[in-house]
Image (cartoon, rainbow, N blue to C red):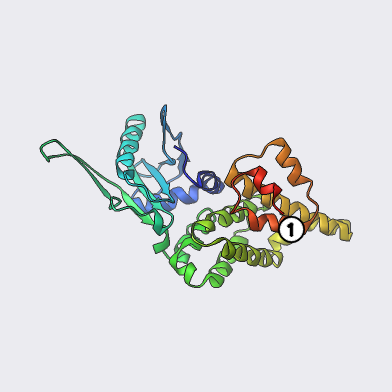
Amino acid sequence: MAKPFDATLNALIAVRPDDWAAYFARLAGIPPGPSESLDTDLATTLQADRIFRINGSKPALLHLELEANHRLGVPRDLMRYNTLIDHQHELPVETVLVLLRPKALASDQNGLYTRHGVTGSIISQFRYRVERVWERSIDDWLRGGLGLAPLALLTDEASADLETALDRFHTCLVGTGADRTVTNSVLGSSYVLCGLRYDNERVAEMYRRLSMLMKESTTYQAILGEGREQGLEQGLEQGRLRASRELLLRQGTKKFGSPSVASAAILNGITDLGRLERLADQILDATGWDEWLKTE
């Protein structure tokens, strides 16, 4: 069953899957080792969020489920996923429930699910780990690697001093030496995910500040490099337009899915930087490509 922000989270994990596997495997007590992503289809109508095989001294499987909204009954689903994964791969399975915001926490998510029989006797018990993203420190998520860095902006610590948090996130982003594609993907994911924690106006302000920080970084300068090499002011303008359109395309794809040919053509045809900036501000309010691109 698709959940809100699935596309954004899947795209973020895909940037650096090893970061996610290593971080949560350590929390689950799985010995460290190389990881590989496994098929998440468990049945005709059942799909887990993420499954990793950790090939350490004791090979094991890591099952991640990410929740952004309040939903009772999740522990029962987790036990079902865990059992099916075990049957498919015949390896120990550790399940970690990752809650992205306080709103997602439900009363039954305490790390233990118990099934009772008709007489009240215990039939089975299933233990899983609950990770509340907002309770960890900014540094904890930043140390986890570039793939986990956007989660630092969802913490209570970040909310209390967002300007400092953005500076630290920016330092992490440019300090990794990641290429333009990876940098833009992480930026786009962080922008969309911040909508889980902050109101639209504050997210837009955050994005503008991040944009200014990136303009001062070598990463952003590399985006504009082709224009400078031509030695033309027009080249600089085209570099800015291209970078803005690429970032908006990633943001839109993460929130709405892949655009139609017509929508992609409309976005690629925008040559007004002001309009591109307005689209960045309006993405959180839009429900689809057509609505978003029609806004002014």
Q: Residue furthest left?
A: 119
The spot of residue 123 in percent (x, y) is 17, 37
The spot of residue 268 in percent (x, y) is 76, 45
Tell me, yes or no, if residue 172 can be seen here: no
Is 90 drawn above or below residue 106 in the view shown?
above
Looking at the image, which is closer to me, 116 or 222? 116
According to the image, label 1 marks what residue? 222
Q: Residue at x 54, y 47 (%)?
A: 8
Is 143 drawn above or below residue 116 in the view shown?
below
Tell me, yes or no, if residue 272 can be seen here: yes
Q: Residue at x 44, y 55 (%)?
A: 100
Horizontal placement of 195 versus 275: left or right?
left
Looking at the image, which is closer to me, 274 or 174? 274
The spot of residue 151 in percent (x, y) is 49, 58
Occupied quadrant, residue 258:
top right
Looking at the image, which is closer to me, 120 or 226? 120
Q: Residue furthest top?
A: 44
Is 10 drawn above or below residue 224 in the view shown?
above
Amino acid type for the residue under numbered disc 1: Ala
